[in-house]
């Protein structure tokens, strides 16, 4: 199994009964540290005080991988700052607060526990654009490193990363309005990096909090991806406590899934839609989402009209952020529960999502289910197909040929739209796992199921030839 390198960072297997499956270890992390530091040194040749900030989630082996990465960065001439277990957006905030040259988070995000990885960050705290990522990976592959004495340790103001992050998030909502509601909230932090900051946020917002899986740990209480199959216990707890809402973070706290007041998982697509509805009402403007995201946000923007225009990008936070900057968007994100608010940082952020959703509920004193039932209705189906990279091109070619009656976009796999029928299909290789993703959305379950069945048949047949 190859190491996966993409705009979403680098991910690999850190533990397995078969040693030959292990692709992420100290040596890999150290070389990545050297590659990124060499890239940063090459871009700032006149400076000798470059700082790199590193953090991690609680995954097994994360502490060792972070130290190896930072050691590699020091070998190539950078000073380093280890801020421990912190959310991905929290690390991004610290990169900006310390005027660092870059940052890194040791995490595999939503991937299962046997995975770990490295997310890189620019001085703005966001993922490097694809062109820069490819240059960094080329340095890694070719051992093209700069050798230099470590930079002198820079005097950095003592900043609590959780508190610093929280202060920015709270500025985006009406705190007093939320506190007046005294919402009952269940939060599942999946033993990840978001536990401390998530608890701090909800307590500051006056919520009556039931917090589960609330301490970072090397292993997770359940499979970490925040989808329906993994959140049955959260749904049960929302029902049994009579909570107003349930929230589920992923291990590095850049994604958020929501359970309504009836204990029903509403689907990760609604995280972005609910936040978009609130943002459009208060600061109308353009929004950027990826090609795999529901039409819900398009419909909500159309209800408001100009300047609420939707731009779509390839999948991956770096691609969404680039589109946000290009079109001066007030908001962005991905349909996996990732919400990006540039007022805080150009990174998906579960704390932003929680705050915006609570502010939406407080503003009109409505329930989550009310907003979900009054939004346009779509049926979305997401499937995964295990495959190697060599199989992807033929599957995409087959998809293009089989669905030539629709409008085709090929900037990221193959997306086919049938606007008059309110349906679309997206087939692409994953940025984070050795799989292909097939996503369909249509006006009803029957149409979505039919489209998915046909797409699966096309992809499966292509792999048999």
Image (tube, helix red, strand yellow):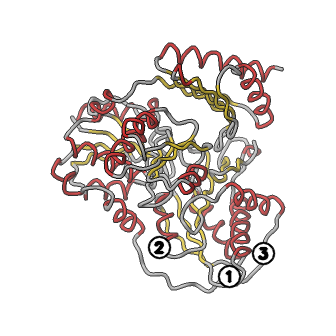
In percent of the image, x 28 and y 44: which residue is there? Answer: 360
**Residue 454, x across and y down, in percent:** 65, 16
Tally the marks.
3
The quarter of the picture where residue 133 lies is bottom right
Between discs 1 and 2, the one toward the N terminus:
2
Question: Where does label 3 land, which residue?
Answer: 146
**Residue 368, x across and y down, in percent:** 29, 35
Q: Residues within 10 Å of mark 2 (few under 14, many from 20)?
A: some
Of tags 2 and 3, the one toward the viewer is 2
**Residue 335, x across and y down, in percent:** 49, 39
Which quadrant is home to the N terminus? top right
Residue 150, numbered label: 1
Question: Where does label 2 land, which residue?
Answer: 97
Of tags 3 and 1, the one toward the viewer is 3
In percent of the image, x 59 and y 62: which residue is there? Answer: 121
The Cα–Cα distance between marks 3 and 1, rounded to whole angstroms, is: 11 Å
Q: In the displayed image of the protein, which residue is found farthest to the left? A: 180
Q: Nearer the viewer, residue 18 or 252?
A: 252
In percent of the image, x 73 and y 71: which residue is there? Answer: 38
Q: Is residue 57 above or below residue 148?
A: above
Q: Nearer the viewer, residue 46 or 213?
A: 46
Q: Residues within 10 Å of mark 1 (few under 14, many from 20)?
A: many
Between discs 2 and 3, the one toward the N terminus:
2
Residue 373 visible in the displayed image = yes
The Cα–Cα distance between marks 2 and 3, rounded to whole angstroms, is: 26 Å
| Residues marked 1 and 2 touching at CB (< 8 Å) | no
**Residue 29, x across and y down, in percent:** 68, 61
| Residue at disc 1, secondary structure | loop
In percent of the image, x 26 and y 33: which residue is there? Answer: 261
Residue 55 located left or right of residue 249 = right
């Amino acid at each position: 199994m190859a190491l996966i390198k993409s705009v979403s960072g680098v991910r690999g297997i850190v533990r397995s009964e078969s040693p030959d499956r292990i692709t992420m270890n100290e040596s890999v992390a150290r070389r990545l540290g050297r590659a990124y530091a060499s890239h940063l040194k090459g871009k700032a040749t006149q400076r000798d005080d470059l700082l790199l900030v590193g953090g991690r989630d609680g995954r097994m082996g994360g502490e060792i991988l972070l130290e190896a990465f930072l050691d590699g960065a020091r070998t190539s001439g950078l000073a380093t700052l280890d801020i421990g277990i912190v959310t991905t957006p929290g690390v991004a905030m610290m990169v900006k607060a310390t005027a660092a040259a870059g940052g890194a988070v040791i995490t595999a995000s939503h991937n299962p526990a046997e995975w770990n990885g490295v997310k890189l960050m620019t001085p703005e705290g966001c993922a490097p654009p694809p062109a820069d990522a490819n240059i960094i990976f080329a340095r890694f592959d070719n051992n093209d490193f700069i050798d230099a004495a470590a930079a002198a340790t820079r005097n950095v103001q003592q900043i609590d990363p959780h508190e610093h992050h929280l202060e920015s998030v709270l500025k985006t909502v009406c705190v007093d309005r939320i506190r007046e509601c005294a919402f009952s909230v269940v939060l599942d932090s999946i033993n990840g990096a978001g536990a401390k900051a998530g608890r701090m946020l909800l307590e500051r917002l006056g919520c009556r909090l039931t917090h589960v899986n609330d301490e970072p740990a090397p292993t997770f209480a359940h499979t970490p991806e925040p989808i329906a199959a993994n959140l049955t216990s959260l749904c049960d707890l929302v029902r049994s406590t009579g909570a107003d809402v349930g929230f589920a973070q992923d291990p590095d706290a850049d994604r958020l899934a929501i359970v309504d007041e009836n204990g029903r998982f509403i689907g990760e697509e609604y995280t972005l839609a609910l936040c978009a509805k609130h943002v459009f009402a208060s600061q109308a403007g353009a929004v950027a989402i990826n090609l795999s995201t529901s039409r819900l946000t398009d419909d909500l923007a159309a209800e408001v009209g100009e300047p609420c225009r939707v731009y779509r990008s390839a999948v991956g936070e770096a691609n969404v952020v680039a589109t946000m900057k290009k079109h001066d968007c007030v908001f962005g994100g991905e349909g996996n529960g990732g919400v990006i608010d540039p007022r805080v940082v150009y990174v998906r952020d579960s704390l932003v999502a929680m705050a915006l959703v609570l502010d939406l509920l407080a503003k009109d004193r409505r329930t989550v289910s009310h907003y979900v039932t009054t939004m346009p209705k779509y049926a979305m189906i997401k499937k995964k197909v295990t495959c190697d990279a060599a199989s992807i091109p033929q599957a995409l070619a087959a998809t293009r040929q089989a669905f030539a009656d629709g409008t085709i976009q090929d900037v990221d796999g193959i997306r086919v739209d049938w606007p008059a029928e309110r349906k679309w299909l997206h087939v692409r290789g994953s940025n984070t796992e050795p799989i292909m993703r097939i996503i369909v959305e249509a006006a009803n379950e029957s149409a979505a199921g039919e489209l998915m069945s046909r797409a699966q048949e096309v992809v499966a047949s292509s792999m048999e030839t």
